[in-house]
């Protein structure tokens, strides 16, 4: 669980959160690729994210009907549901 001050209310981490993980773990985290990827590298990141979250268990809404962090992250990356992420992976994964 990440501290609230590092979470973007729209999903994912904010700039302070990315800086925190860079200091603590040396991670070089980048912001989400929300729209159409501009490069092959961005496309690969989006496919990787979609593949991870397509298999993620858990609800899209909490007991009060609010979207969960999972749902917010999917939305931030441009996916409306787990099924949409799964479909994106199926259609964009390179045959390696």
Image (tube, helix red, strand yellow):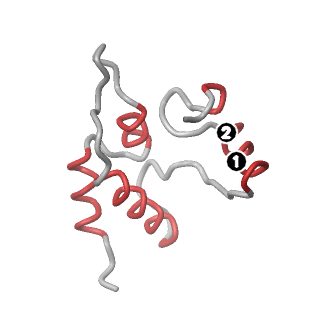
Q: Is residue 5 above or below residue 15?
A: above
Marks 1 and 2: CB-CB under 8 Å? yes
Question: Residue 31, position in %: x, y?
Answer: 58, 49
User: In the rendered view, does 82 fall on the left or right side of 36?
Assistant: left
Q: Quadrant of the N terminus?
A: top right
- Pick out the residue farthest to the right: 23
Please tell me which residue is depicted at 29% across the width and 53% down the height of the picture: 54
Crowd tier of the residue under label 2, counting other residues whose Cα lies within 10 Å: few below 14, some 14–19, many 20 or above? some
Residue 72 appears in which quarter of the rendering?
A: top left
Label 2, secondary structure: give it. helix
Q: Is residue 83 left or right of residue 95?
A: left
Element on which disc 1 rests: helix
- Report which residue position mark 2 lands on: 17
Residue topped by disc 1: 21
- Residue 29: image quadrant is bottom right
Q: What residue is drawn where x is 41% and y is 63%?
A: 48
46 left or right of 91 in image: right
The local crowd at label 1, few if under 14, some if 14 to 19, many if 20 or more residues have their Cα within 10 Å, is: some
What is the residue that sits farthest to the top in this orientation? 64
């Amino acid at each position: 669980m990440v501290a609230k001050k590092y979470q973007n209310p729209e999903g994912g981490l904010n700039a302070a959160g990315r800086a925190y993980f860079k200091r603590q773990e040396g991670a070089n985290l980048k912001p989400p690729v929300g729209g159409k990827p501009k490069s092959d590298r961005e496309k690969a990141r989006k496919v990787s994210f979609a593949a991870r979250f397509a298999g993620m268990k858990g609800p899209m809404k909490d007991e009060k009907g609010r979207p969960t962090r999972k749902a917010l992250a999917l939305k931030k990356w441009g996916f409306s549901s787990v099924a949409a992420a799964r479909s994106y992976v199926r259609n964009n994964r390179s045959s390696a």
